Image (tube, rainbow, N blue to C red):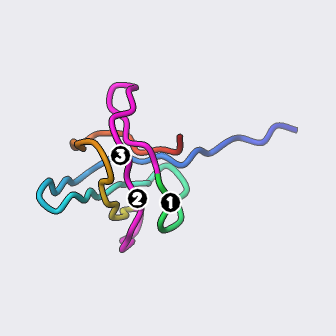
Amino acid sequence: MVTPVNPIQGRVTVVNIRLRFVIVDFAFSQPPVLQARLGLYRDGQRIGEVRISGPVNGTSIVADVLSGEAEVGDLVRED
């Protein structure tokens, strides 16, 4: 029996540069737990790190940008 792997990954939909947070949509993945640290990726390259902080609204979750500079469309996933 083969069990499919559903990695935790989402896309950045909103960026607030001044307050250093993003909103990430996890519509096609299971949502991460609060306080999880996930990598921030652009074009396959790791460019930073975020921490899931909430609140949660449907499939969208707020995350604090810990390092790097996020842009809309960046991938957020487990390392």
Which secondary structure is most common in the magenta stretch? strand
Which residues, given as a range, are shown in magenta?
Answer: 38-59
Q: CA distance from mark 1 to mark 2?
A: 6 Å
Q: Is residue 76 left or right of residue 65?
A: right
> What is the three-letter code of the residue carrying label 2?
Arg
How busy is the neighbourhood of tag 3: few (under 14 within 10 Å), some, or many (20 plus)? many
Outermost bottom residue: 55
User: Mark 3 vs mark 1: which is more N-terminal?
Assistant: 3
Mark 1 = which residue? 36
The quadrant in which residue 6 appears is top right
| Residue 3 located within the stretch drawn in magenta | no
Q: Who's the residue at 52% across and 51% down the image?
A: 29
Which label was assigned to residue 11?
Answer: 3
Q: Is residue 27 left or right of residue 16?
A: right
- Secondary element type, mark 1: loop
Residue 29 in the image: above or below residue 3: below
User: Mark 3 vs mark 2: which is more N-terminal?
Assistant: 3
Badge 3 vs badge 1, beta-carbon distance below 8 Å: no
> What is the three-letter code of the residue carrying label 1?
Ala
Q: Who's the residue at 21% across and 57% down the image?
A: 20
Mark 2 = which residue? 51
Badge 1 vs badge 2, beta-carbon distance below 8 Å: yes
Q: Nearer the viewer, mark 3 or mark 1?
A: 1
User: Mark 1 vs mark 2: which is more N-terminal?
Assistant: 1
Residue 52 locus on image (x, y percent): 42, 62
| Residue 46 located within the stretch drawn in magenta | yes
- Secondary element type, mark 2: strand
Q: Who's the residue at 34% across and 55% down the image?
A: 24
Q: Nearer the viewer, mark 3 or mark 2?
A: 2
Which image quarter is the N terminus in? top right
Q: CA distance from mark 3 to mark 1?
A: 16 Å
